[in-house]
Image (spheres, helix red, strand yellow):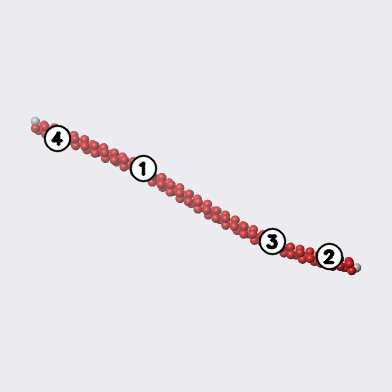
Amino acid sequence: EEEASGLGERLEQAKLAEAATRARLEEEEEQLRSSQQDRERLRDQLKDSEDAHSQASRDLALAKESEEKAADEAQRRCGELEDNARSLEDELTSLRRAEGAARQEADRMNETSRQLEKNCEEA
C-alpha cells in the first residue's frame, strides 16, 4: 500500500512536471513564432529601405543628368548670345562708318551746291 501510495505520488508529480514542461514548451514556441514574425518584419523593412535607397539613387542620377544637360544648354545659349552680340557690334560699327561716309558725301554735295549757287550768282 505504501508502495502504491508512493507510486501514486510520483505519478502525480510526473504529471505536474509534464504539464509544467508543456507550458514552458508552448511559451517557448510562442516566443519563437513572435521572434520569427519580428525577423520577417525587419526583413520587409530592410527590403523597403533598400528599395527606397535604390529609387533615391536613381532619382539623384536623373537629377544630376538633368542638371548637366541644363548647364550644357545654358552654356550653348550663352555662346550664341555672345556671338549675336559680336555680330550686332560689327553691324553697328559698319553702320557708323556708313553714316560717317554719308555725312561726308552730304557735306561734299552741300559744298558743291553752294559752289554752284555762287557760280550762278557770279554769272
- The quadrant holding residue 41 is top left
Q: Secondary structure at mark 1?
A: helix
Please indicate whether residue 68 sits to the left or right of residue 26 in the image.
right
> Which residue is the extreme one toward the left?
1
> How many marks overall?
4
Pointer 1: residues within 10 angstroms few (<14), some, or many (20+)? few
Query: Residue flagged by tag 1: what amino acid is it?
Result: Arg
Q: Is residue 92 above or below residue 54?
A: below
Pointer 3: residues within 10 angstroms few (<14), some, or many (20+)? few
Residue at the spot of label 4: 10
Residue at the spot of label 1: 41
Q: Secondary structure at mark 3?
A: helix
Residue 43 at x, y percent in the picture = 37, 44
Q: Which numbered disc, 3 or 2, marks the residue closer to the eye?
A: 2
Say which residue appears at 90% left-offset and 68% top-offset: 123
* Sequence-earlier tag: 1 or 2: 1
Q: Which residue is nearer to you in this view: 101 or 118?
A: 118
Residue at the spot of label 2: 113
Q: Which numbered disc, 4 or 2, marks the residue closer to the eye?
A: 2
Label 4, label 3: how far apart the Cα atoms are: 120 Å
Q: Which residue is nearer to you in this view: 97 or 83?
A: 97
Say which residue appears at 16% left-offset and 33% top-offset: 12
Query: Residue flagged by tag 3: what amino acid is it?
Result: Leu
Residue at the spot of label 3: 92
Say which residue appears at 79% left-offset and 64% top-offset: 106
